[in-house]
Amino acid sequence: MPPELLDSPLFLAAAVLGALGVLLVLGGLFSFYQLKLMRFVFRLLLGLLLLALGALSGTVAVGIQGYRALTREELAARILVKPTAPQRFTATFRFPDGREATYAISGDEIYVDAHILKWNPYANWIGLHTAYELDRVAGRYHSTRDEQAAQRTVHALAHDRPVDLYALRRRYTFLAPLLDAEYGSATFIPVTRDAEFELRVSTTGLLIREAKAAQ
């Protein structure tokens, strides 16, 4: 289990709510054994409610693992591109956490998109802030005809996760009051020579620009 998950207020809330829910359900069963039906119903319903809230908190806590909190414009990755043939190039991503990955891409431009988790304002009260996750990198052609007929390449940048909040929000409308996950963002830039780009993300979306040469 990731250490950051254990420190998450939502995960701690899920553990507390789950424990209280289990105790109330057990207490309800004990009341049923004693034929105290009203107490049984009350404890059972309250216990189930707490278990449901705990499950929701745990799902959100697990689902936001891998997303990075976004409060200002920040560097998402440095990208080194190198043409290898006409409409072919490699792109090496260097992430802030030290990871590095290289992809072979077909196209005239490099294209990157991301998922943005934008929480409703009252969710900020429990520490949930706008967050992002890079989703994929692909090639993009200048010509629409090439887009339709030429070789296409796409590579995943996101990690597999046990709970995907972005997908859950799109599938279940009851999450709408809590989370607005309809926000995706993309950016692209031509690749004509060896170059280094900065991929940045802000509250308005992704942007990419050529890195400034060191002074």
Image: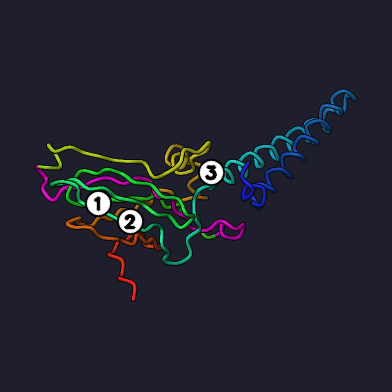
Q: Are marks 1 and 3 in contact (CB under 8 Å)?
A: no
**What percent of the width, then of the height, locates residue 26?**
81, 30
The type of residue carrying mark 2 is Ile
Q: Residues within 10 Å of mark 3 (few under 14, many from 20)?
A: some
Q: Which residue is mark 3?
A: 63
Q: Earlier in the sequence, mark 1 or mark 2?
A: 2
Q: Residue 79's mark?
A: 2
Residue in view at x 23 percent, y 46 percent: 139
**Residue under numbered circle 1:** 110
Crowd band around label 2 with a 10 angstrom C-alpha radius: few (<14), some (14–19), many (20+): many
Instruction: Tell whether label 2 touches label 1 (CB within 8 Å).
Output: yes
First to last magenta residue range = 122-145
Does label 3 or label 2 sit earlier along the sequence? 3
Q: Secondary structure at mark 1?
A: strand
Foreground: disc 1 or disc 2: 2
**Residue 147: image x %, image y %?**
15, 42
